[in-house]
């Protein structure tokens, strides 16, 4: 569709919570933006870089689902693009990894609004890295899966088959799996993963209430929300490097 004479919407990844982990391009766009629509978990320190007079709008959803619907956010982006030159939709992490960045850009493009996606550091990789846990490692893990632990019930079927996944990849990184962690563990065990497989649970990475613990897969149950859950032998290698660095173990 031909683009109309409106502003540009930038779908920007803010990174995992540490304001220093945003990309240079993402930060420059925050500084230029006339309007910023941001998620709940975006660092408030980043918003301080907005220029004087910029509209800053919280469109994040709090636990329990309170907040604008995705349809409402789409309409807001369209409306602001008609009035302003630079609109930034600021997502936590990466907008294309379990975010709605693609859907937002598609919605705008179908209506002739120019849209650009600026990637960010996703929490599923950044949170383990903070604790020296690699997603892949020579001789230990040559494959990784980034999966969601929470799916829309309206789909009527779970797209992530954890039983099959247990035998398909070496490292499994689970987003949004806090309440379903026990069921996920049961499926992974049924799929053949040993009960002593190490699991790292990282809650609220890069935020003041951050927590980190390592348990065995057989002991995994519901965990605090929001958490990144890492399943695989790479967790042991991360603990080994922490020992070498003199960092206290969880």
Image (tube, rainbow, N blue to C red):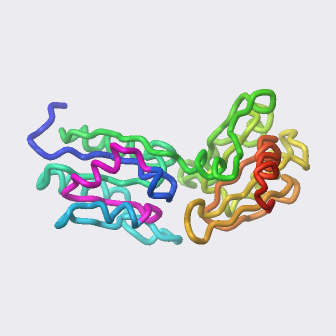
Instruction: Count up the numbered dots.
Output: 0
- Residue 146 or 236: which is nearer the viewer? 236
Rendered location of residue 215, percent (x, y): 83, 57
Residue occupying the far left of the picture: 5
Side (left or right) of 242 relative to 189 = left
Q: Residue at x 75, y 52 (%)?
A: 184
- Place of residue 198 in the rendered image (x, y in percent of width and height, measured from the top left): 83, 49
Residue 74, x across and y down, in percent: 29, 53
Residue 135 lies, with reference to residue 55, above or below; the image says above
Q: Residue at coordinates 60% horizontally, 60% vertically from top-left?
A: 205
Q: Which residue is located at x 73 percent, y 28 percent?
A: 142
Which quadrant is home to the C terminus? bottom right
Confirm whether residue 187 shows in the render: no
**Residue 14 in view in this figure:** yes
Residue segment shown in magenta: 22-43
Position of 161 relative to 218 (above/below): above
Q: Quadrant of residue 34?
A: bottom left
Is 42 magenta? The answer is: yes
- The residue that appears at 28% across and 45% down in the rendered structure is 10
Magenta-drawn stretch contains 27: yes
Residue 71 point in image, percent of width and height: 33, 56
Position of residue 45 in the picture relative to residue 77 (left or right): right
* Relative horizontal placement of residue 8, taking residue 28 as reference (left or right): left
**If the image is split into quadrants, where does the N terminus sit?**
top left
């Amino acid at each position: 569709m031909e683009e109309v004479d409106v502003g540009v919407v930038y779908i920007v990844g803010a990174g995992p919570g540490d304001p220093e982990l945003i990309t240079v391009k993402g930060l420059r766009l925050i500084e230029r933006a006339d309007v910023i629509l941001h998620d709940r978990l975006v660092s408030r320190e980043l918003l301080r870089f907005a220029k004087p007079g910029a509209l800053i709008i919280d469109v994040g959803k709090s636990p329990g689902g309170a907040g604008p619907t995705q349809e409402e956010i789409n309409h807001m982006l369209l409306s602001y693009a008609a009035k302003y030159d630079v609109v930034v939709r600021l997502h936590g992490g990466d907008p294309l990894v379990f975010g709605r960045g693609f859907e937002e850009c598609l919605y705008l493009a179908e209506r002739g609004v120019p849209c650009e996606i600026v990637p960010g550091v996703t929490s599923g990789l950044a949170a383990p890295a903070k604790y020296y846990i690699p997603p892949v490692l020579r001789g230990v893990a040559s494959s990784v899966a980034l999966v969601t632990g929470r799916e829309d019930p309206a789909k009527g079927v779970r797209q992530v088959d954890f039983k099959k996944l247990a035998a398909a990849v070496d490292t499994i990184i689970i987003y949004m799996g806090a309440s379903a962690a026990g069921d996920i563990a049961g499926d992974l065990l049924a799929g053949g993963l040993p009960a002593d497989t190490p699991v790292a649970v990282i809650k609220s990475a890069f935020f003041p209430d951050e927590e980190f613990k390592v348990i065995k897969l057989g002991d995994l149950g519901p965990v605090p929300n929001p958490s990144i859950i890492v399943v695989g032998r790479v967790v042991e290698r991360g603990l080994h490097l922490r020992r070498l660095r003199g960092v206290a173990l969880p």
